[in-house]
Each structure stands twice: as C-alpha cells, then as structure tokens.
C-alpha cells in the first residue's frame, strides 16, 4: 500500500467518523445502538456466570440439606430402633404379666403354700438323659428334692436335685418320674410315669375291674407323701386290658404344657420347709427313760474286773450306805 492510498483511507475514515459523530449528536442512534449492543454482550457474558454461580450455590445448599437430612435420618432411625426395642419389651412384659396372672389363679391346697420360680434352662438335644428344666430356686428357697412343681393347669413334675440357688425339675413325661394319682370320676388309683418325649405317660397298677372313662381327669392322690391331694395331673387318653399284666394299660396326657415353660410354682407345706426324712426317722425311735443318779451308777464297780476269787462281784455300797 502506498503512502497516498493510506493517507486517502485515513482522510476517508476521518470524514466517516466525523459524519457519524455529527449524525449521532443529532439523532443519538449510535449511542442507543452501543448501549443495547453492550448490554446484550454483557448479559451474554454474565448469564452463564450467573447460572454457574447459581448452580454452585444450589448444589452447596442441597449438599448441606442432604447432610442435615442424613443426620435427621440417623436420629430418626435411632429413635425408631429405641421405640421398637421399647415396644418389644412392653410386649414381653405384657405376655409375662398375663402368664403370671394365670399362675396367680392357681389355688393352693389347704395347708400348702406356693412359691414362684422362673425356668432358666431346659434339656438340650434329643439325647438328653432327663426330661427336665432348671429353676432359679434352690434348697435355700425351699426347693428340696421331691418338692411338687405345678402351673395353673396342673402338675409339671417334681424337684429331682437342688443346690443352694438352683434346682432341677423332673418332668411328668420322664420315665423316671412317678406320681400317685386317682381318677376324678371313677376314683381308680394308679401311679403315673412318663414314657419320654412325644409319648403319653402310662398309668400303672390300674385294677382290671376299674371303670376307666376316656377323657376323665387324673388328680394327685397324696398317697406318695410328696404331693397334696387333688391337683390335676393328666387326662385319660386310652384304657384297655393288658395281655401281659393283671392290670389295665392306661395312657394319659399331662394337662400342663411341658414345652415352653417359663414360670412355675413350687408347693410347700404351710408350716415351712419340707420335713427332713432323717428327722422323721429320729422321731419314730422309742423314747429312752429319763436319766437319774441311780441309772448313772455303773452296774459293776471299777475293781470287779480284778476280783481275786473270780466269783460273783460284790456290789459296791449304795450312796445311802456310804453316808
């Protein structure tokens, strides 16, 4: 480009500028155009920035809200867990209260008292030696061997062995358990003994001429010296003559549910603990004569053992003669 052409373009540009300036001064069109165009350009620049800023702000707010929601969720979850545990505890307390109320409906026989006990253990596995449960009462609480154990429905068993604070109860369905019973209607006597799990206990020594009714209740007869008379034990399931025994074959199911035991009652004579059999043996011994000074005098004098003649010893002087 030559200098003249550059100069000519400069002069032309100057004239165009002055013309536009003069025209803008008169009309203001360029100012309006510049303002609008500038606003559009600034708006186009600021709008994405505002969107980014707003998005970041919303994201942060949502994050903060999410954190708060998580904290509230954790708090509510903990409250729900505590409420669920409290409800379960209340349900358990309610069921225990219902069981205890049923247990309180048991009427103790005359001259007998009932002591509540809780089952804390039971037989484990099908090969367990005994059908038994463990109670939280021992002989310090009166749970001596032979103590009757009952529920509101009837006899559960009897204490087999005990230590100061715990005891083992032999259940009615154990083959080693024996309880003297009598039928409630036809009054035939017998001894009930278990046959193991899943089998009804047998009633032994039922006379062949006894009129046994299916479904009648068997109650304790009290003839064994351990159980009071009149406590329900079982109901007769079947009775038939025996081919190998002079007695009838009678089976009966226990009235008390032996599975799922939780609370039971221990029966004791109202006077106190069960009597020690040794004390009864001592009481049955004949009374010795009352000791007197004469009865305490030896039959032979101390010197009779060395009597020179070997004859009959001479009785020593009596206390009166000595005086």
Image (tube, grey):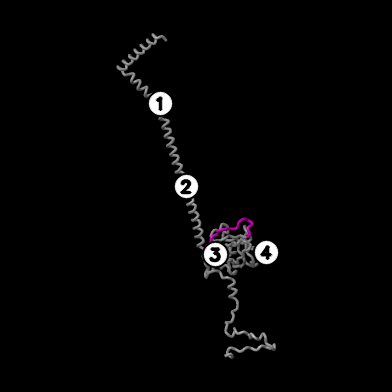
The image shows residue 318 at horizontal and vertical percentages of: 60, 89
Say whether marks 3 and 1 touch (CB < 8 Å).
no
Residue that extends furthest to the front in the rendered view of this protein? 3
State the residue at coordinates (67%, 86%): 306
142 in the magenta segment: no
Secondary structure under tag 2 reads helix
**Residue 122 visible in the shown view:** yes
Disc ID at residue 78: 2
Of pointers 3 and 1, the one earlier in the residue sequence:
1
Instruction: Place residue 186 in its image quadrant.
Output: bottom right
Q: CA distance from mark 2 to mark 3?
A: 43 Å
| Crowd class of label 3 (few under 14; some 14 to 19; many from 20; radius 10 Å) | many
115 in the magenta segment: yes
What residue is disc 3 on?
266
Front disc: 2 or 4: 2
Q: CA distance from mark 1 to mark 4?
A: 110 Å
Q: Nearer the viewer, residue 76 or 321?
A: 321
The image shows residue 7 at horizontal and vertical percentages of: 37, 10
């Amino acid at each position: 480009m030559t200098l003249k052409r550059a100069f000519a373009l400069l002069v032309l540009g100057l004239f165009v500028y002055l013309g536009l300036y003069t025209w803008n001064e008169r009309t203001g069109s360029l100012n309006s155009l510049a303002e609008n165009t500038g606003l559009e350009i600034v708006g186009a620049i600021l709008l994405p920035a505002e969107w980014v800023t707003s998005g970041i702000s919303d994201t942060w707010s949502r994050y903060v809200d999410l954190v708060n929601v998580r904290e509230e969720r954790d708090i509510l979850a903990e409250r729900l867990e505590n409420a669920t545990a409290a409800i379960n505890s209340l349900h358990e307390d309610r069921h225990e209260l219902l069981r205890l109320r049923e247990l309180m409906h048991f009427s103790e026989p005359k001259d007998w008292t009932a002591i509540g006990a809780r089952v804390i253990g039971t037989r484990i596995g099908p090969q367990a030696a005994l059908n038994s449960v463990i109670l939280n009462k021992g002989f310090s609480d009166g749970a001596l061997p032979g103590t009757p154990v009952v529920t509101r429905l009837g006899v559960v068993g009897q204490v087999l062995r005990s230590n100061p604070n715990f005891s083992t109860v032999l259940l009615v369905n154990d083959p080693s358990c024996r309880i003297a019973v009598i039928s409630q209607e036809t009054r035939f006597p017998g001894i009930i003994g278990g046959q193991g799990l899943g089998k009804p206990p047998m009633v032994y020594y039922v006379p062949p001429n006894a009129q046994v009714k299916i479904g009648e209740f068997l109650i304790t007869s009290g003839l064994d010296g351990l159980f009071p008379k009149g406590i329900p034990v079982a109901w007769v399931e079947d009775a038939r003559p025996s081919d190998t025994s002079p007695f009838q074959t009678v089976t009966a199911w226990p009235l008390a549910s032996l599975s799922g035991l939780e609370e039971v009652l221990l029966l004791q004579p109202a006077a106190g603990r069960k009597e020690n059999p040794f004390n009864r043996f001592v009481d049955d011994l004949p009374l010795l004569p009352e000791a007197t000074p004469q009865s305490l005098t030896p039959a032979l004098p101390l010197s009779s053992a060395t009597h020179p003649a070997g004859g009959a010893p001479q009785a020593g002087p009596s206390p009166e003669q000595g005086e």
